[in-house]
Amino acid sequence: MRPLEGITVVTLEHAIAAPFCTRQLADLGARVIKIERPGVGDFARAYDERVRGMSSHFVWTNRSKESLTLDLKHPEAKPVLDRLLERADVLVQNLAPGAAARLGLSFAALQPRFPRLIVCDISGYGAEGPYRDKKAYDLLIQSESGFLSVTGTAEQPAKAGCSIADISAGMYAYSAILAALYERERTGKGKAIEISMFETMVEWMGFPLYYAFDGAPPPPRTGAFHASIFPYGPFRAGDGRTVMLGIQNEREWVKFCELVLGRPELANDSRFSSNSKRSAARAELTAIIENVFAGLSAEQVIEKLEAAQIANAQMNTMHDVWRHPQLEARRRWVEIDSPVGTLPALLPPTARTPQEVRMDPVPALGEHTEALLGELGFDAPAIARLREHEVI
């Protein structure tokens, strides 16, 4: 039995934050019913066509869900939604600010009728404050939270290459829902959960915030290098490839000089005899390191780093990751179904075997509408009428 089998989640979601949260719940066995706008659906379905015509974002965040098309603004949608919520344990929504409340779907409105229902609202900035109604997309939250100010090069800030603000909000929502389900086991009562993308990202900015405590200078933008530890970052080998390495302490620095650089005298060189001195002399030390690496391939550099037990990594591309030997050795890739056929998918990080988690198909838009309505007690003529009135 999977941990969340028997739990039903109704979700009014789009984009990434809420879908990423509810996919984690589905992975653990929850039944996730995704309500989508008729004819259009979650707008993330149209972000791109990279997965045999399907959106890469949608495939990533929506497997193992059931898709029900329903126009929430239509008066005839309310009985459908009410019947769904009667059976639901969790309602998740990341609609536009205030939209759920206008639809009568706030925790305050639902709690008297559904006292065991957990309601999770995901928004950009939260339900109060001057930014409450401000639009919040991932890049904008990265900027507003200060993430861009410490990411990139000295000349140019850079966004994270994945939807880090959406992911942070989705994961906090996921963990909060798990905690609320556990709490409900003891109290029998549902709970209101409010997740702000902005606040989750500011939480993740804890190190640079405290580094800049009390007016101190913030961490500089240093590209792929560490802002305060050196050498820690990318260095070019003689074959043009890049090797990432990290020196964490003086013991490692001595071994690096002796076994990797073949320059043991550098370990006690007054220019480099502490991390703060090495960090201040980055350009000079980088030239020394890359002069040695110039006579070696990236593979040979990594062999030396491994022998010296110095932390290292290859700078892989997405194509490299698809073929990564560690994922293959641990059998992390499985196959799932989708409207465009079988697709590869990664097992969730917590799962050791495919049997532990749900790895069901990515749904087509409205694929489960009629089956769900039938399950809720709507007969064929009633379903036909809902379709004729463009409710579904």
Image: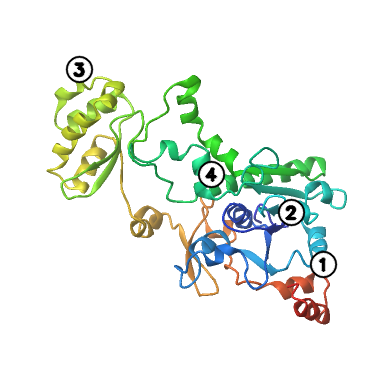
Q: Position of residue 239 (x, y in %)?
A: 17, 50
Q: Which mark is residue 141?
A: 4
Position of the N terminus by quadrant: bottom right
Under mark 1, the amino acid is Pro
Residues at marks 2 and 4 touching, judged by CB atoms closer than 8 Å: no
Asked where in the image residue 360 lies, by quadrant, the reply is bottom right
Secondary structure at numbered mark 3? loop
Relative to 238, residue 86 above or below: below
Label 4 to label 1: alpha-carbon separation = 35 Å
Label 3 Cα crowd, 10 Å radius (few <14 / some 14-19 / many 20+): few
* Residue 246 visible, this angle: yes
Q: Which mark is residue 100?
A: 2
Label 1 to label 2: alpha-carbon separation = 15 Å
Residues at marks 1 and 2 touching, judged by CB atoms closer than 8 Å: no
Label 4 Cα crowd, 10 Å radius (few <14 / some 14-19 / many 20+): many
128 on left or right of 377? left
Position of the C terminus by quadrant: bottom right
Instruction: Looking at the picture, tell me which residue is in the foreground, 78 or 290.
Output: 78
Number of disc labels: 4
Tag 4 or tag 2, which sits nearer the N-term?
2
Secondary structure at numbered mark 2? helix
Tag 1 or tag 4, which sits nearer the N-term?
1
Q: Mark 1 sits on what residue? A: 75
Tag 1 or tag 3, which sits nearer the N-term?
1
Point out the frontmost of discs 3 and 1: 1
Q: Position of residue 85 (x, y in %)?
A: 79, 58
Please, which residue is most extreme toward the right here? 112
